[in-house]
């Protein structure tokens, strides 16, 4: 199964994706890590465009073909990226479960963005202005939505596990 996360920076998606990867267990693939590794390589100067996503699609497909459950952690902001993840799962013969993580309390969301510490060496974290200006298309397709506002990671994880188990049965 391919479990595809989406949501704006600071919504709680990486925290929840990592917790889910440990709980299942599943392989964990984070676009921020891939994109920063590409920048660090010096191969691409400036904006790396979709390179991180394309690298992730390939790694994900390889691991899905081996029968692994894989969690893809990214903003996944556009219909084209969402469709690409579905195609990865389809080519690998795996189910695709899509999750949108939101933080409906804008004050809490802003506080998270402004106070979080980075964990990918060299990665510049977005500020609140970057987050609010981010190109993010609302979902038109049905998607599991987890609102992390005023909730613990454990509570969100329990809800997510229930949704995934229901989808698997």
Image: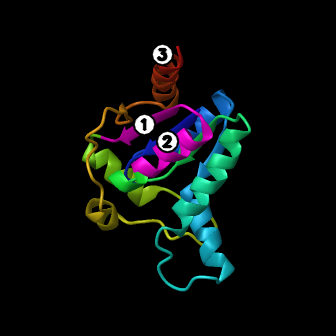
Q: Residue at x 55, y 64 (%)?
A: 52
101 horizontally vs 43: left or right: left
Residue at image mark 2:
4
The answer to whether the residues at label 1 and label 3 have Cβ atoms under 8 Å apart is no
Q: Is residue 59 above or below residue 24?
A: below
Front-lying residue, 161 or 85: 85
In the image, residue 85 lies in the stretch drawn in magenta = yes
In the image shown, does 101 or 167 lie closer to the viewer? 167
> Judging from the image, what secondary structure is the residue with disc 3 in?
helix
Front-lying residue, 30 or 129: 30
| Highlighted range, magenta | 82-103
| View extreme (top): residue | 169
Q: Quadrant of residue 63?
A: top right
State the scheme by which the image is colored: rainbow
Residue 99 in picture, x, y percent from top left:
42, 36
**Residue annotated with mark 1:** 99
User: SS class of the residue under badge 1?
Assistant: strand
Disc 3 designates what residue?
166
Q: Which percent across, then down, holds residue 40? A: 65, 77
What's the residue at 49%, 46% (across, down)?
Answer: 87
Q: Give the CA separation, mark 2 to mark 1.
A: 6 Å
| Up-down relation of residue 36 to residue 143 (above or below) | below
Q: Secondary structure at mark 2?
A: strand
Q: Where residue 4 appears, x then y in whole percent?
A: 49, 41
Disc 1 crowd, CA 10 A, few/some/many (<14, 14-19, 20+): many
Residue drawn at x 47%, y 79% as measured from the top left: 47
Q: Are marks 2 and 1 in contact (CB under 8 Å)?
A: yes
138 vs 154: above or below: below
- Tell which circle, 1 or 3, labels the residue nearer the N-terminal end: 1
């Amino acid at each position: 199964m391919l479990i595809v996360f989406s949501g704006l920076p600071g919504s709680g998606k990486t925290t929840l994706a990592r917790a889910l990867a440990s709980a299942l267990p599943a392989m964990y693939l984070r676009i921020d890590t891939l994109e920063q590794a590409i920048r660090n390589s010096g191969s691409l100067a400036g904006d790396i465009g979709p390179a991180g996503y394309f690298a992730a699609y390939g790694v994900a497909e390889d691991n899905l073909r081996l029968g692994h459950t894989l969690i893809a952690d990214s903003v996944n902001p556009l219909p084209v990226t969402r469709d690409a993840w579905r195609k990865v799962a389809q080519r690998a013969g795996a189910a695709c479960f899509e999750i949108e993580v939101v933080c409906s309390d804008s004050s809490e969301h802003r506080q998270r963005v402004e106070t979080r510490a980075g964990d990918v060496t060299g990665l510049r974290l977005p500020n609140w202005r970057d987050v609010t200006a981010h190109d993010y298309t609302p979902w038109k397709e049905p998607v599991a939505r987890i609102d992390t506002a005023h909730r613990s990671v454990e509570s969100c994880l329990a809800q997510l596990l229930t949704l995934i188990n229901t989808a698997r049965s």
